[in-house]
Every structure is written in structure tokens, then in C-alpha cells.
Amino acid sequence: MKILSIESSCDETAVAVIEDGRHILANQVYTQIAIHRKYGGVVPEIASRNHVMKMPFVVQDALDEAHLDFQDIDAIAVTKGPGLVGALLVGVSEAKALAYALDKPLIGVNHIEGHIAANYLAFPELEPPFLALVVSGGHTNLVIVKDYGLNVILGRTRDDAAGEAFDKVARVLGYPYPGGPAIDKAAQTGDEHAVEFPRAMLEDGSYDFSFSGLKSAVLNEINHNKMKGIDFRKEDIAASFQAAVLDVLTDKTVRCAEENHVKKIVLAGGVSANKGLRKRMSQVGKKHGWQLYYPPLSLCTDNAAMIGARAYYDYQLGRTSDWHLNAMPGLELPGVVK
Ligand code: KG4
Ligand code: ZN
């Protein structure tokens, strides 16, 4: 089954063609990063307008890359949410138009489930059940993917998502948007013990996350240094901040894995591109005998291939959409909340 999939939830206009949920026939990503960089972050209206302008060309590029025509496509998939409402609407409208014109099934996909499914593309042998740590720009979750159609959500963020904290700290340090990769790079040459930032573990037994206290502590440290004229290395702040985030992410994942007797661990979302996180999880994973999976860098951040992978399983489960499909900006990860 060949699915043409569309992703436009934020600032990437992306279209892919995926076969049977596991094979990438085409993966086109037109990134708008350069357009938004001068504003220090994504400007929703500008993102929507660029999606409108680029979408038909990216669709054609994906078909060309796969050496296919519209007639060869079996279904159309699209990110329905979460994301920026105007940006999502462009993808949803394109997908509906294509599905209607081609008389093919329409599959609205949850973007966060898409991030998890990026691992199905990279690892053909990977099957549920596993424990997924989702760390993206908008979400932080610890979820047991029991089966393709059943998530058990154990932890979520109570305030800022991990990626959001990276972006905000980077901005104050004067790094360009998107901040995560800049902090990642700076941290490699910084001293992670330069400043002991707080690690919010929350109440005993909780798998939830909170990064806003850490973010405020970092901003206070920078402001304090600037006001008192104290010299500091940006790399040291970046490394100390990143170490605090990684401590919380790894500690909670280890505890969650042990308490739920899971040894198959999957990382997903933009922050799973972080070199420090990948290294730390690999070390911890070795110690605990995990089978650890994380996507290649190109599939960590937003792309349509992951949407096509997830769509295949949604289709198998009968979870197709009708013409009422709409953008759902506040959509949560579906599942049983524990
Ligand atoms: O998953 P994603 O593409 O978007 C959402 O679905 O939200 O994640 C984007 C986030 C941004 O916050 C970005 O700064 C962060 O992922 N990110 C990173 C790295 N690469 C991207 N954070 C830390 N280290 C990285 N190397
Ligand atoms: Zn994303």
C-alpha cells in the first residue's frame, strides 16, 4: 500500500510517499527555518502563507522522487494536529482535495504518534510493546505503546515541553532559531558543572515533567551575571542547562522502564536529535540491558515520512477520516491516561 502523506503543522512543508508503513519511497521536506529566523521564532501567518505557496510543488517533487503518478497512490494521509491552526489547515485542505479528486481514502494522523512512528521507518524489526519517550517542541511524554492502536500515557509535561525550554534558553543566550541544535552544539564545548541548575523530579512516583522552573533559573542566572558584570561562557550555561534536562529525562525514563518491566525503549521528537541525549540514553541503556531505538537525524524533526508510517497503521485499524476532517491545533496524544 502506497500512502502519500503531508505534514504542515509548523514550519516544514513536507510530503512523502511510504509503502506499507515501513519503506520510504520519497521524503521531501521544504523547511521555512531561514524565513522565520529573522523573527526569532515561527510566525504563524507567514508559515501558513509559505505552506500555501509551496505545497503543490512539494507534492509533485515527492511523486517525482518516488517515480510515481497520482494513480499509483492508494491513500492520502495528513497531520491533523497538534500544531498551528493555519498551517495545519493548508495540509488538511490539500489532502482532502487530493483524496476527493483521486477517490482514495483520507487518513488524518496525530503528529505526536507520527514522531513515534519515525522509528518504524528506521527499524523494520521494531514492534510494540515498547516504552516511548516523546520529546518535541510542544510535547514531553512517557508512553507505553502497548500495540499499534493502544497507548498508555504515564507522564506528560505540566508546563514547558523539553524543546520549548531549549528554544527559550537559546533565545536568551542569543543563539538563532531553532535553539535546540545551537544549545546541543554549544554544550559540547561547555562545562556542565559550571552552574548547578535545579532538576524538577516532582512528587515521588510521578512520571510527569516540569521544565519551567529550570528555564527561569537559567534566565535568572544570565540576567544576574549581566547585571553584575560577571563574565560567563555561553557554552557553560548551555552545557549546565542541557545536563539538567538530560538528568530529568533519563532518570524518569529509567524509573518508568524498571517499574513497568520494559526493556525496549524508543526516543521520538525533535529533541531526540540531541547528541547529549542520545549518548546518555545509550550509556544508561547498556547498563540496564535495553534495546534502545532512536530515529536518524533526518527523521527526528518534522517530516511527512513519519506521518505516512503512522497512517498505515491507522488505516489497518480502520481509523480513516471523512470529509469533516479539520485542523485540530490542541490535539493530544491519544490513549489511556494513567
Ligand atoms: O518534534 P519537533 O520537530 O516539533 C514539534 O513537533 O514540536 O521538535 C522541534 C524541537 C524544537 O524545540 C527544537 O529546538 C528541538 O526540537 N531540537 C533540538 C535539537 N534539534 C531540534 N533540541 C535539542 N537538541 C537538538 N539537537
Ligand atoms: Zn514535530
Image (cartoon, rainbow, N blue to C red):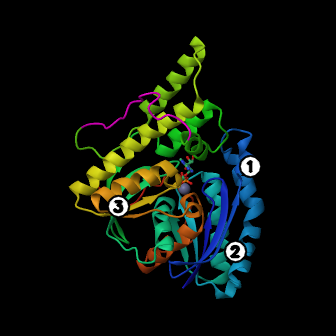
Task: Identify the residue at image location x=30%, y=56%.
Answer: 287
The boundaries of the magenta stretch are 189-203
Are the residues flagged by discs 2 and 1 in contact, CB closer than 8 Å?
A: no
Front residue of 120 and 297: 297
Q: According to the image, label 2 marks what residue?
A: 62
- How much space separates mark 2 and mark 3, taking CA atoms? 32 Å
Q: Nearer the viewer, residue 218 or 313?
A: 218
Q: Position of residue 138 (x, y in %)?
A: 50, 48
Where residue 199 appears, as percent x and y from the top left, is: 37, 34
Q: Kindly report the distance in space between the C-alpha atoms of the residues bearing marks 1 and 3.
A: 36 Å
Please name whichever residue, 277 or 299, is drawn nearer the observer in this view of the structure: 277
Is residue 335 in view? yes
Residue, disc 3:
335
Q: Residue at x 51, y 45 (%)?
A: 163
Query: Which residue is located at x 49 percent, y 28 percent?
Result: 218
Secondary structure that dominates the magenta span: loop
Inspect the image, locate mark 2, and give the three-letter code of the amino acid beneath it.
Ala
Distance Cα–Cα, label 2 vs label 1: 22 Å
Tell me the tag on residue 152: none
- Mark 1, residue position: 34
Q: Is residue 5 above or below residue 216?
A: below
195 drawn magenta: yes
